[in-house]
Image (cartoon, rainbow, N blue to C red):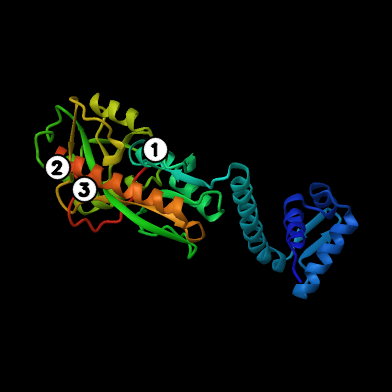
Amino acid sequence: MLELRHLQVLRAIAREGSLAAAGRALGHSQPTVSHHLATLEAHFRTPLVHRGARGAVLTDAGAALLPHAEAVLGRIGAAEREVAELVRRGASTLRVGTFPSAGALLLPPAVRTLHRSGVRIQLTEGELPALLDGLRSRRLQTALVYSRPDGGLDLGEDVVVHPLLEDPLLLVLPADHPQAAAERVPLAALRDDGWILGATEEDPVDRALARACAPHGFEPVPVLRTDDYGVLQGFVAAGIGVALVPRLGLGPARDDLAVRPVDGPPLARRIGVAALRTADRAPARALRAALTEEAARLLARWAADGAGAPAGCDDPSAGRG
């Protein structure tokens, strides 16, 4: 019969590179490590570790088993932390992740609502890849996420995503830009402008922008790269370039900027709250309800400002955090 200590030994050997080092990491003697490894290999009826003069490495079978061992140990670790927290505090702690722009606008009022009802929230801020890793590893129980250009988040069957709102991607121009007076700006009119883009070439907003510009026969030319929306808007206001920004990332209106929708198919990213199916208890449901209410208020405010989410948006393009 498999036991957790057998999987712990395999993981330790993979990390430490030898049976002796694995034993030291686990607080076991080398004979104990060898015994647990032999039991594991007998269970699978194949060698899992190759022992050599320079240490130990996993065989192909051991390498195939390792991610499953790590997943099992990760789930057990998460369960231990959750139960220990419940015993220590007498109330469940909900581990929540958020990307920065949602953390600034959507999440604080929802967290305040839960705090008032006695639910403790442990918050983690990060970009989308870190949030997805947190959900997969069970370090997070729920997280605000947004769609990527391909529409997929690859979270597996253990995570469900509940939609909240569509966040339009809007053009940000200097107030004195020739297109600033237009109600909607054609991308073709910006072919000669420099663009302020994300910090990496893989930035999802930039990829959405590149796809939208391609039919017009040009690629956006970067004059600055940043993931800080405050920095971005400052340089746009100074006339250094133009940018495409999620509505959630804009902040208060500025007199030195013009914010306009793209003329053509609307661009947007879908914001949702992802939750582990195993964590779908009262606190998680209460957070989801509070986020849904806050998203409705935010959409109403955008509509009143004349910059609401575009109707009928089918584009799953994603944006920066």
Q: CA distance from mark 1 to mark 2?
A: 39 Å
The amino acid type of the residue labelled 2 equals Val
Amino acid residing under circle 3? Ala
Residue in the foreground of this view, choosing between 218 and 112: 112
Q: Would residue 132 be found to the left or right of residue 105 on screen?
A: right
Estimate the spatial distance between the alpha carbons at disc 2 and disc 3, rounded to whole Å: 16 Å
Counting residues from the N terminus, which is met first, the one under dot 3 or under dot 1? Answer: 1
**Upstream in sequence: badge 2 or badge 3:** 2
Q: Which mark is residue 309?
A: 3
Q: Is residue 57 visible?
A: yes
Identify the residue shown where x is 9% and y is 38%.
Answer: 182
Q: Please name the residue shown 39% across and 58% down the image.
A: 161
38 vs 173, left or right, is right
User: Which residue is the site of mark 2?
Assistant: 185
Q: Quadrant of the N terminus?
A: bottom right
**Which numbered disc covers residue 112?**
1
Q: Quadrant of residue 184?
A: top left
Q: Secondary structure at mark 1?
A: helix
Q: Position of residue 224 (x, y in %)?
A: 34, 32
